[in-house]
Amino acid sequence: MKNMFNILVVVLSQIVSGIIWWFWLGNPANFKDGILRHDPINTYGTIHTGGPLVAVLLGLLIIAITFIIERFLSINKAKGNGDLSMFIKSISSNLAGGNISAALSECEKQRGSLSNIVRSGLERFQQIENDKEYDPEKKIAEVQRAIDEAVNLETPLLEKNLVIISTVSSISTMIGLLGTTLGMIRAFAALGASGGAVSAQALSIGISEALYNTAFGLAAAIISIVAYNFFTTKVDNFVYMIDEAILSVMEILTIKVKK
């Protein structure tokens, strides 16, 4: 289902960009020669002359923006409610005082990835705390196992779709370069076919194709690279706080079971 969402975003983005390129940018009203679309009279028409690769690059730009919004919302949701540092302090304080129920209550209020991980460990601890079949070492091992399972479930959600943003940053530059190359080929072909009498229209179409493909390729790449680095940093900081919370919880529980 999650992969279907990604595929749907990619397909719809390319369809929407194709519609924009052909019906809006390629509107006959943007050209002196109408439906022939060879002689633009404004910026929209000039961008259209950049060729089909402009539509592809617009699609990549839409894909990047879509997944940037998705990552922003998802990571904010994963943080839960309130300040994470205060949440960790509150959990540690409650556990140090032996009030596991209060710690679980804090997890319910926080409702984020970190709280889900901590809650998994605390709930498992409650289940085996008074079980005589488990010695102190086994109790700690069971809690650690429950926490590790929760981490394995939550962490991938933080990093999901970052690879798509990274891919867009890479291929948009290459597609832009391809469009630039094709545009220059068209420009020099027009120059060669003219036998010295250069056709300004043919030459400008080739140069426009080159420059607009370069512009859109760089725009998509810059946005994607900045977003990827931004979200990677946020995820790394979040994972660090998760590790800090797990370490604090495990230290307190270890002291508690060995008393």
Image (tube, rainbow, N blue to C red):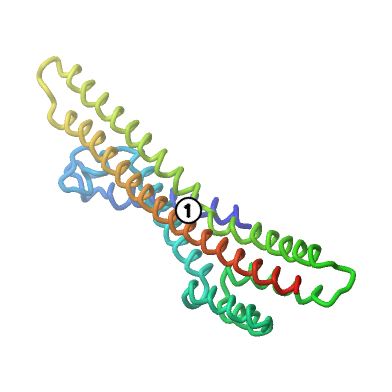
- For the point 31% across and 37% down, which residue is it? 51
Specify the amino acid type for callout 1.
Answer: Leu
Instruction: Give the residue drawn at x 42%, y 44%.
Output: 168
Q: How many marks?
A: 1
Residue at x 30%, y 28% (from the top left corner): 182
Q: Is residue 160 left or right of residue 121?
A: left
The picture places residue 157, in percent across and down from the top left corner, at 57, 59
252 or 163, nearer to the observer: 252
Q: Position of residue 135 (x, y in %)?
A: 84, 67
Instruction: Tell me the residue at 63%/78% (across/down).
Output: 96
Give the left or right position of residue 247, taking residue 77 as reference: right
Q: Is residue 142 left or right of residue 206?
A: right
Q: Which residue is mark 1?
A: 12
Q: Quadrant of residue 214?
A: top left
Find numbered disc 1 in the image and state the secondary structure of the residue it sits on: helix
Binning the other alpha carbons within 10 Å of mark 1 as few (below 14), some (14 to 19) or many (20 upward) gives some
Q: Which of the image's four quarters has the C terminus?
A: bottom right
Residue at the far front: name it: 259
Q: Nearer the viewer, residue 63 or 190?
A: 63
Single out the residue that lies furthest toward the right: 133
Answer above or below: position of 125 versus 42: below
Along the line of sight, which residue is nearer the eye, 192 or 244? 244
